[in-house]
Amino acid sequence: MTKEKETENRSERERFLDRMLKEILSGQRKPGDRLPTESELAEQYGLRKTNVHLGLQELERLGFLRVVPRHATYVAPYWEQANLETLAAIMTHGGKPQPELVDAFLELREMVALGWFRWTGRNPKTEQMRHLYGLLERMEAIACAPDGEKDKPEFLDLVNQFLVCMFAESDNMIFRVLLRSSRELAHVTYYIVAYTLDMRELCRTYRTVLDGLTSGHASEAIDYWCGWSDKVTVQYREALLRLESE
């Protein structure tokens, strides 16, 4: 198969997945509903049957479908069997994020970050801190640019790199496992950040924390971060309420 053909098939499967997920998450197709056959779905959406088959397999893997061999395919009670990939798909395709889910994710993020701060404060790694400070300087350059020249997508990408560096370069295996497990949900934070982010304040917070960790003042750095995190969490929730009312 040529590269162009592979790309076309992948794009077709992605469109099918997107369409099906939107129908499921909007309630158009409810848990327990029986899906049409693969041939009927292919005809309905104007797709190749092979791509429909592969798309349904992926939806089953993500927990949205239950396939009964040689019988039928049903919409699954996906909330009852959700894993991190299921949550990531819900956030990506479910339209406006659900406040309860975002709250739960932010609470998990805060607990993990606090653990990392405490662990790193006891044993800061020179090379890791050098990398984090380098990313922070690039973030600060964008944050301090004139308003019309701020590259927010690039800034958010640097935030992502910063958080990945925190955990990926840690000697603590649990932090690395958590990073791999929650990487699919990283966009949740950044989606909401796009509505609430004060770039300069975020940079100040990260610099204060890094300075505290490297100077032996970890407890003060953690207190500073907790106060900022609590405030930002409230902003996230307010942004969600505004989105719900639109």
Image: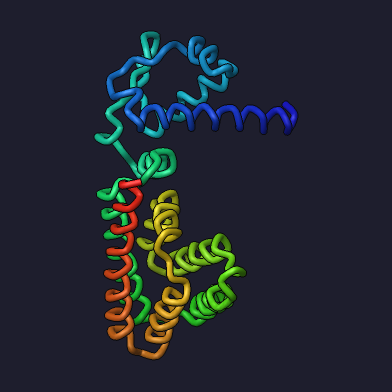
- In which quadrant of the rendered image does the N terminus lie? top right
Looking at the image, which residue is at 51% across and 20% down? 53
Q: Is residue 99 above or below residue 234?
A: above
The colour scheme used to paint the residues is rainbow
Looking at the image, which residue is at 43% across and 70% down? 198
Q: Is residue 143 above or below residue 68?
A: below
x, y percentage for residue 94?
A: 39, 39
Corner quadrant of residue 215: bottom left
Corner quadrant of residue 222: bottom left
Looking at the image, which residue is at 40% across and 78% down? 205
Asked whether 243 or 57 is in front, the reply is 243
Is residue 127 visible in this depiction of the protein? no
Asked whether 85 or 103 is in front, the reply is 103
Corner quadrant of residue 35: top left
Question: Across the whole image, how many numbered discs are drawn on residues?
Answer: 0
Residue 234 lies left or right of residue 44; in this view the side is left
Asked whether 36 or 94 is in front, the reply is 94
Looking at the image, which residue is at 53% across and 74% down? 143
Q: Is residue 19 above or below residue 210?
A: above
Residue 1 lies left or right of residue 223; in this view the side is right
Residue 118 lies left or right of residue 45; in this view the side is left
Is residue 8 visible in this depiction of the protein? yes
x, y percentage for residue 114?
A: 30, 71
From this viewpoint, which residue is outermost toward the front? 246
x, y percentage for residue 229?
A: 31, 70
x, y percentage for residue 179?
A: 41, 58
